[in-house]
Image (tube, coloured by chain):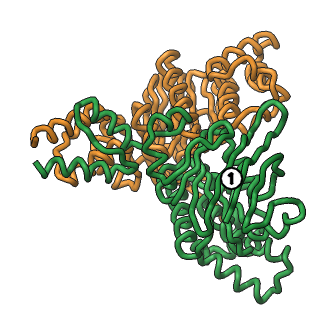
Amino acid sequence: MIEVKNLKFSYDDTKTTIDDVSFSIPDGSYTTIVGHNGSGKSTIAKLLAGLLEKQGGSIQIDGLELNMENLTKIRSRIGIVFQNPDNQFIGSTVRDDIAFGLENHNVPQPEMDGIIETNAAKVKMTKYLDHEPTRLSGGQKQRVAIAGVLAMKPKLLIFDEATAMLDPQGKDEIKKVISQLHRENNLTIVSITHDIDEVADSDYVLALDNGKLVMEGTPHDVFTDERKLRRIQLDVPFSLKMRTALAKQGVDAGRHITMEGLVKELCQSLSNM
Amino acid sequence: MSISFEHVSHVYSAGTPYEYKALDDVSVTIEEGKITAVIGQTGSGKSTLVQHLNALLLPSEGTICILDRTIKAGEKPKKLKSLRKDVGLVFQFPEYQLFEETVIKDVAFGPKNFGATEEEAMAKAREALTLVGLGQDTFEKSPLELSGGQKRRAAIAGILAMNPSVLVLDEPTAGLDPLGTIQMMELFHSLNKKYQKTILIVTHDMEQVFSHCDNVVVVENGKIRMHAPVSEFFRDSSLCREMNILPPALIRMKDLLVQYGFEVPQEVQDIDGLAKVIARQVKHHG
């Protein structure tokens, strides 16, 4: 359980980056954080992971206050995967790279091999264990980064726009891995994203604008409020744009987050009459 | 004048165990004054193809005609400097290449390199920065102080300051947020319409291709799989599906409607047109 209360942070005196933000994230849930560039999303991720120090309010993780005293304890429960697949490699092979965190924690060699294999399998990279990371595709690199983080047995996984720099195929691979980790491993997931399909997969959405939490709720609640979405400069799902175009033609349709929902409803007015 | 590739092949690391043929007998003519999308999977050869346009890569075989120059395999290219001024190439994540102390100095670097005086270069830099939508307040800032989207704009301004007639952009919107993406595409659209620049955009985003480009070139395994006007390419989803590309939302919507028993004519290619088609069928039944 993550409990954030009245969180405040600024990089300098000119602008408040995180302005009195409160939210809670239950164990085992999948939460997405959305907002335009500069809204404060990534700063929240870094504050949660203890990479930045809060300047006001509180962050509690499993009942422990995130402060200098508890930092090491809390960090061991959190894994974070960043945006750029090229900026997070240390090892000369995939195996070495996944091993890096384990070596730092003095895990004995025989045990380490098993952990590496298990986690490579979770992201479907077993075949590539002896490959050089530089020769992998973007999606494969991100999967290795995820395996490296999983090897540390975190309870909470944070993805900071982990799919933003990938091609469509890579994005798909990572989205599947995230959903699967959530379903099968009971991990708590916080993902910062611009991808509407990824949002639709999550349980709960937090929307930020200028460092403030401006919307929260289920993906359906947040992404069917067209006026508010536009005000905070977020993309409106196609199904809502279609609904507006239909209204101009005198056709009333409900608010749907997916096209399938909209078409199914329209289809009923076709066949019922 | 035109931009054409005639039987162009490109081999990386020729004569080594890593030898790799990235382009294989490519012949294609790019229409001037239009926006052409270059699409294809990662590793298909898209970036290799566009890097030939300013002779950053030279063909291993074949000939490239670009504006009034000819680049032939095996020959030392002539007038390289003026070619690089006329064809501006913006790499992926160009913001990593910002290096000067201030934004304006960074943008002025190109024109100065091509012989402009300090004053001329600064004037060109101011003009280019205004064109990409960066205000005066950013000119004297360090590039590091800008947001991701602003950095990308500054990097593109650095190329525009040389006033190229052909602009080549390799995944210019990757990593930008939805609004940043729309603004970036609108910028290219206006550069094309107002200043008649020929623009090539390498992209994975079919929404951009559908709404902003005139033509589409599909690269697959180092070959041109297809070259067609955008309206023809997206007439229905069959070509996209065949090439394993996710079609734009409007085309997916048309598919779904058909699947659920609606009649949707192929020529409908905008959201209001589609709404009319649906309205007629829903009302007709009522």
The one nearer the camera, A149 or B226, is: A149
Q: Quadrant of residue A48?
A: bottom right
Residue B155 on image: x %, y %: 69, 31
Q: Residues within 10 Å of mark 1 (few under 14, many from 20)?
A: some
* In-image side of A217 versus A98 (left or right): left
Query: Chain B colour?
Result: orange
- Secondary structure beneath label 1: loop
Q: At label 1, which amino acid type do we have?
A: Asn
Point out the residue furthest to the right here: A69
Q: Residue at x 74, y 74 (%)?
A: A152
Q: Quadrant of residue B43?
A: bottom right
Point out the residue furthest to the bottom here: A110
**Which chain hosts label 1?**
A
* In-image side of B218 versus A254 (left or right): right
Q: Residue at x 66, y 81 (%)?
A: A117
Q: Does residue B132 show up?
A: yes
Residue B150 on image: x %, y %: 68, 31
User: Which chain is tinted green?
Assistant: A
Q: Quadrant of the N terminus of chain A?
A: bottom right
Please say if B215 is above or below A145: above
Residue A52 on image: x %, y %: 81, 51
Residue highlighted by disc 1: A84
